[in-house]
């Protein structure tokens, strides 16, 4: 039977897996599965892959469940859900029995949680909802005819994209005694509530990474490591440099703490490689394990079928001699191992795929991961670390894959005029005929310190099914090609990255099957920035789509949830004299919009707190004032910066249809 083309509505068919955890003794794998029904409602539930390979669903209900964890010492699991009382609560599901709620927290949001190795305690973070904004308060206002209350805050950290406004409320670190349900506060000292923590092997202490500053956005990055006892008494490890620190893990023998980060004080946006460090729990023998390696432990490979979560994944082997981690490299994501004595990095896998490592078996022989490639929607897999063998354990999307015709990718490296190489991919349209010429869309990724690569991308497949050549690349600023490649655009956007994009453009126009008169560019976030920059510096494009964009660094400096600190990533300030503003303005695409003639579709979410919608409002007005054809699509406040990959299904479908229709109108 002939296969059909990929459609926008196929998004409703996808079953998305994540967060696999291996039972420490019998190898069963706990994971989450997100599905969407025909009424556009998405929900996640926990499943388990049994020892015989059979898959069993563990949780039910409309509220969904997540963050499933094996409880030490048995087959029971714990999970977080909003079922029952208002806000997040922690539940336990016995191996044979019904789930029961073990916390009675005030209405709020639960962050990370970890069981102590002896199974007696749970350390967790929780942020209480402000009293004025609880469900009960909202119901009372409605009954009494009162208006919504105002927010008031005195710090720079009062909102976060995807999380919304929370004012002065903060995540705090708590301790739950499992047997009694007693909860006590361990720490409220993090200015941003940014706790990253791990248990000691004997369950008597916690190692915690958090900022030591009262106003982290105002000060230089200064994460420090603290040791907390179970009464909340803390001691800061002496002598550690400032910089970013996260993903802390205590070695099984109790001798070492391993963590990721860097010791730079002027890299708040992650242009430098994330490195691996170790230190004794008393602060002695601090050491960087990879001060010179080109590998970066924190590389997000972007996709619209997997959340773009960052953060290094670090797992000690049982003998406390090595670390298993993941490495982003040239568009792929691989499993790697680090010798903790010598610092030697060893890649355990290699191939045209992405392996997102999420756990290590109790014997240290097997890693649980999420596997994906350009033709495979992510599935749960395990990796045999001795043989580097990858085995996929689920096939939730195989039936869909079997019925559609997918566009394959071709890749290569392009030489720029200044001697750099740019990794680029091309997808030819479905039904490709070498004798024909096709309209082409150049996609530019966000970040910018992320990478495109060897993952499934529904948006790309939709465009290829519509008859477009799709090209994407990793210009300078992208992760996965060494620190110099990424750091080359630090505080200097629109320069070397634009050289690389122009190199890709020149290559596209040289392809015999490309109709250069029907050439478009699009991108989101930083990709929106580069789209705006491109149409202000080139007449090559018949049309453009700028999504959740950056257009004006002067206004964005204070309108983003991550405000620009003075002379940090970018030099200068937006609240100073013209000389100090000049650098920000010269890198702002809006400064060159008097040169734009390209019809442009503008997409943005009103709930975007990372790149505020005012960035797109400026673009739209600049285009309309000059009589340039433009269309502004604004999504409601319930959406955020990541709407294209994690937003409501009906609005994601609407967005894709807007994209398809714009290209049909202008590229044919």
Image: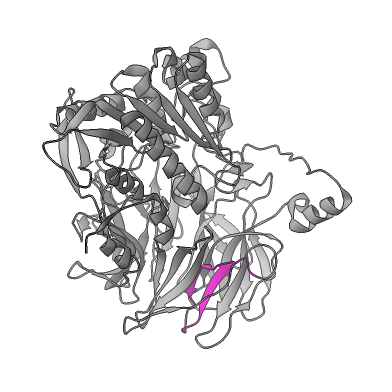
Q: Residue at x 49, y 85 (%)?
A: 95
| Magenta stretch holds residue 332 | no
Single out the residue that lies furthest toward the right. Answer: 144
Look at the image and tell me in which quarter the C terminus lies. top left
Query: In the drawing, does residue 599 fall left or right of residue 631?
Result: left
Range drawn in magenta: 63-83
Q: Residue at x 40, y 33 (%)?
A: 662
Viewer-nearest residue: 111 or 536: 536
Look at the image and tell me in which quarter the N terminus lies. bottom left
Q: How many marks?
A: 0
Q: How is the image coloured?
A: one colour
- Residue 149 can be seen in this image: yes
- Residue 270 can be seen in this image: no
Single out the residue that lies furthest toward the bottom. Answer: 96
Viewer-nearest residue: 337 or 326: 326
Residue 434 position in % (x across, y down): 11, 39
Residue 611 position in % (x across, y down): 51, 34
Residue 503 position in % (x across, y down): 21, 27
In the rendered view, tell whether residue 512 sits above or below residue 202.
above
In the rendered view, tell whether residue 580 sits above or below residue 616.
above
In the rendered view, tell whether residue 653 sits above or below residue 3.
above
Give residue 399's quadrant in the image: bottom left
In the rendered view, tell whether residue 202 sits above or below residue 476.
below
| Magenta stretch holds residue 70 | yes
Residue 157 position in % (x across, y down): 61, 41
Q: Residue at x 42, y 21 (%)?
A: 589
Query: In the drawing, does residue 254 fall left or right of residue 559?
Result: left
């Amino acid at each position: 039977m002939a296969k059909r083309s990929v459609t926008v509505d196929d998004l409703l068919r996808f079953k998305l897996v994540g967060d696999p955890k291996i039972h420490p003794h019998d190898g069963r794998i706990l994971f989450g599965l997100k599905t969407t029904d025909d009424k556009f409602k998405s929900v996640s539930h926990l499943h388990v892959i049994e020892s015989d390979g059979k898959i069993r669903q563990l949780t039910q209900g409309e509220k969904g469940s997540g963050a499933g964890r094996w409880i030490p010492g048995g087959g029971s699991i714990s999970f977080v859900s909003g079922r029952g009382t208002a806000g997040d609560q922690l539940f336990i599901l016995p191996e044979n029995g019904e789930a029961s709620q073990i916390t009675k927290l005030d209405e709020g949001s639960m962050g990370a949680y970890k069981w102590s190795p002896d199974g007696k305690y749970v350390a967790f973070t929780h942020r209480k909802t402000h009293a004025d904004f609880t469900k009960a308060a909202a119901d009372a206002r409605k009954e009494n005819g009162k208006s919504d209350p105002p927010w008031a805050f005195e710090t720079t950290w009062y909102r976060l994209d995807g999380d919304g406004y929370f004012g002065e409320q903060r995540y705090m670190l708590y301790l739950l005694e499992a047997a009694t349900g007693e909860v006590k506060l361990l720490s409220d000292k993090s200015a941003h509530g940014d706790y990253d923590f791990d248990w000691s092997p004997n369950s008597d202490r916690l190692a915690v990474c958090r900022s030591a500053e009262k106003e982290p956005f105002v000060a230089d990055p200064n994460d420090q490591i603290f040791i907390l006892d179970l009464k909340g008494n803390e001691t800061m490890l002496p002598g550690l440099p400032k910089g970013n620190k996260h993903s802390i893990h205590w070695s099984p023998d109790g001798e070492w703490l391993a963590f990721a980060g860097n010791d730079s004080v002027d890299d708040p946006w992650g242009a430098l490689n994330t490195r691996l460090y170790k230190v004794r729990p008393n602060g002695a023998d601090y050491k960087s394990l990879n001060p010179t390696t080109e590998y970066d432990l924190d590389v997000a490979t972007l996709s619209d079928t997997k959340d773009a979560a960052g953060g290094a994944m670090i797992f000690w082997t049982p003998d406390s001699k090595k670390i298993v981690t993941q490495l982003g490299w040239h568009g792929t994501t691989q499993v790697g191992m680090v010798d903790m004595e010598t610092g030697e990095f060893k890649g355990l896998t290699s191939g045209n795929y992405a392996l997102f490592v999420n756990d290590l078996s109790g014997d240290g022989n097997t890693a649980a991961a999420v596997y994906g490639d350009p033709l495979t929607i992510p599935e749960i897999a395990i990796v045999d670390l001795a043989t580097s063998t990858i085995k996929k354990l689920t096939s939730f999307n195989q039936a869909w894959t079997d019925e559609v015709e997918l566009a394959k990718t071709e890749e290569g490296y392009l030489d720029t005029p200044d001697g750099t190489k740019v990794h680029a991919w091309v997808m030819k349209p479905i039904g490709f005929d070498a004798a024909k010429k096709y309209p082409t869309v150049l996609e530019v990724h966000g970040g910018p310190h992320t990478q495109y690569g060897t993952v499934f991308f529904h948006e790309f497949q939709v465009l290829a099914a519509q008859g477009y050549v799709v090209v994407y690349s990793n210009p300078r600023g992208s992760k996965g090609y060494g620190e110099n490649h990424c750091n080359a655009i630090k505080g200097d956007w629109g320069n070397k990255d634009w050289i690389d994009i122009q190199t890709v453009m020149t290559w596209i126009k040289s392809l015999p099957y490309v109709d250069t008169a029907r050439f478009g560019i699009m991108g989101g976030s930083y990709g929106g920035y580069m789209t705006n920059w491109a149409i202000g510096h080139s007449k090559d494009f018949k049309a453009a789509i700028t999504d959740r964009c950056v257009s004006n660094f002067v206004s964005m400096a204070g309108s983003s949830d991550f405000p620009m600190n003075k002379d940090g990533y970018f030099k200068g300030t937006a609240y100073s004299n013209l000389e100090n503003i000049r650098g920000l303005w010269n890198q702002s695409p809006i400064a060159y919009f008097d040169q734009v003639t390209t019809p442009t579709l503008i997409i943005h979410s009103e709930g975007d707190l990372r790149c505020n919608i005012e960035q797109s409002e400026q673009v739209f007005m600049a285009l309309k004032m000059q009589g340039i054809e433009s269309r502004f699509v604004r999504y409601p406040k319930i959406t955020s910066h990541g709407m294209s990959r994690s937003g409501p299904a009906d609005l994601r479908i609407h967005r894709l249809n807007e994209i398809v229709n714009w290209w049909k109108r202008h590229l044919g």
